[in-house]
Amino acid sequence: MALIKYNNRSILNVTALDSMASGALNLITTNTISSGVSSSSFTSNIDSTYDTYLFKFINIHPASDNVRLHFQVSTNGGSSYGVTVTTLSFYAEHPEDNAYTGLGYNSSDDLAQSTSYQNISINSGMGNENDESISAMLFLFSPSNTTFVKHFILTGSFNDSINRAQRPYGAGYFNTTSAINAIDFKMSSGNIDSGVIKMYGLSKS
């Protein structure tokens, strides 16, 4: 990407800017959860404006212990969630007592032509103590494309219910050629107690 230079030394004196560089992150919506909610959804602004959408999860804290944060998408604006999905995942883990380290695959976190919710907290349930939460990122590619399936990748970090640091990795595709226009995040049981979810669009190349 070429470096854009301006004659004026201060941005205060710039009277016009070139078009935004491709790949720039543009914040679209922020869902701030300050009290218990059953789910957090984005039902607008997922459209052809961007080819790639990024969701950032910041200190998502569950109300219940040993639960998973997971997600599904919609092709009808959020009236229903349950698009057929095929996924894969693996994880790294390390307990606080330094007893061992692990890198593994848990087939129970994978879905095969399923309409269930896909786990973001892979391998184990999250803890709900005050110092436990998950922070993660989810990329959703070309949700408005009506020719191909819709791919995603995810990764993050969380404290599980037995005091282990967990690093999840996941990927997959929603097996639909219909446009995806809404996404829903919730716990496998109980409420989302608190946290922030931000939706960004990546400027087209």
Image (cartoon, grey):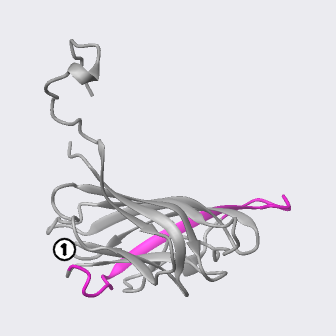
Q: Determine if residue 3 is in view.
A: no
- Front position in the image: 132 or 16: 16
Q: Determine if residue 77 is in view.
A: yes
Q: Give how far across and how far down residue 79 sits, in percent.
A: 24, 87
Q: Quadrant of residue 133?
A: bottom right
Q: Magenta region: which residues?
A: 77-103
Given the image, on which type of amino acid does mark 1 rest?
Thr
Counting every numbered tag in the picture gives: 1
Q: Residue at x 27, y 28 (%)?
A: 1
Q: Quadrant of residue 112?
A: bottom left
Q: Give how far across and how far down residue 69 sits, in percent.
A: 52, 75
Q: Residue at x 73, y 65 (%)?
A: 164
- Front position in the image: 98 or 12: 12
At label 1, counting other C-alpha atoms closer than 10 Å, the crowd grade (few under 14, some 14-19, many 20 or more) is: some
Residue 104 as seen in the image, left or right of residue 155: right
Q: Quadrant of residue 156?
A: bottom right
Q: Give how far across and how far down residue 61 sits, in percent.
A: 58, 71
Taking 155 as reference, is 194 above or below it? Answer: below
Taking 39 as reference, is 88 above or below it? Answer: above
Inspect the magenta stretch and tell me whether residue 86 lies in it. Answer: yes
Find numbered disc 1 in the image and state the secondary structure of the residue it sits on: loop
Inspect the magenta stretch and tell me whether residue 118 lies in it. Answer: no
Q: Residue at x 22, y 72 (%)?
A: 181
Q: Give how far across and how far down residue 166 sits, in percent.
A: 65, 63
For label 1, the residue is 177
Which quarter of the rendered picture does the C terminus lie within?
Answer: top left
Residue 193 as seen in the image, left or right of residue 19: right
Taking 186 as reference, is 61 above or below it? Answer: above
- Front position in the image: 10 or 88: 10
Q: Residue at x 14, y 69 (%)?
A: 146
